[in-house]
Amino acid sequence: MVRYISEKQLTIEEFKTPFRANLSSENRWVKLARVVPWDKFASIYMLMMSSDSGRPGVSPRTVLGALIIKHLEKLDDRGVIQAIQENLYMQYFVGLKEFKVDPVFDPSLFVEIRKRVGHK
């Protein structure tokens, strides 16, 4: 039996979210976040950055996390930013402290990241 109440789409305010619940420790992004050597990667990445000029950069954890997601999920530049924007586990993985609806950075930053880091 199927019960159908209304054809009207719920408003965004009526949609229930799990945001008050804790993240699952069994999620693949949570597990991977525990084993990635973030500090080691960040120190190597920061060697490629200028410490005395330019605007403040995006957190190395966010950049490196986005690169990992990009390659594991085989996403293009825009796709990875959109995936992170839509997925609270990915936001946790890239080091955000809470869910945010804004993109973590502009997808065009991947061009600069590739120039700095190189293909390998």
Image (tube, grey):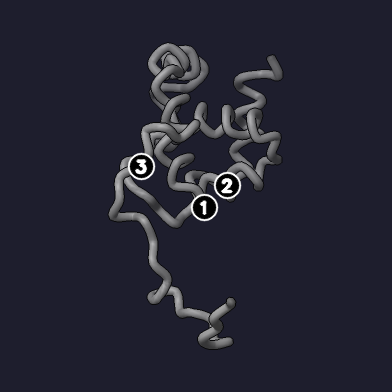
Q: Is residue 13 left or right of residue 21?
A: right
Residue placed under numbered mark 3 in the picture: 23
Q: Amino acid at mark 3?
A: Leu
Q: Is residue 71 left or right of residue 101?
A: right
Q: Look at the image and tell me in which quarter the N terminus lies.
A: bottom right
Residue placed under numbered mark 1 in the picture: 86
Q: Position of residue 42 (x, y in %)?
A: 43, 19
Q: Please report contact status of discs 3 and 1: CB closer than 8 Å, yes or no.
A: no
Q: Amino acid at mark 1?
A: Glu
User: In this rendering, which labeled residue sits more in front, label 3 or label 1?
Assistant: 3
Residue at the (44%, 74%) spot, across then down: 12
User: In this rendering, which labeled residue sits more in front, label 2 or label 3?
Assistant: 3
Q: Look at the image and tell me in which quarter the C terminus lies.
A: top right
Q: Amino acid at mark 2?
A: Ala
Alpha carbon separation for disc pair 2 and 3: 17 Å
Whether 77 is drawn above or below 85: the answer is above
Task: Pick whichever, 102 or 111, lies toward us.
Answer: 102
Label 2: how many residues lie within 10 Å, few (<14), some (14-19) or many (20+)?
some
Residue placed under numbered mark 2 in the picture: 83
Let me know if residue 25 appears in the view. yes
Whether 102 is drawn above or below 120: the answer is below
Residue at the extreme front of the image, as rendered: 1
Alpha carbon separation for disc pair 3 and 1: 15 Å
Whether 1 is drawn above or below 55: the answer is below
Sooner in the amino-acid sequence: mark 3 or mark 1: 3
Q: Secondary structure at mark 3?
A: loop
Q: Position of residue 6 (x, y in %)?
A: 53, 88
Q: Secondary structure at mark 1?
A: helix
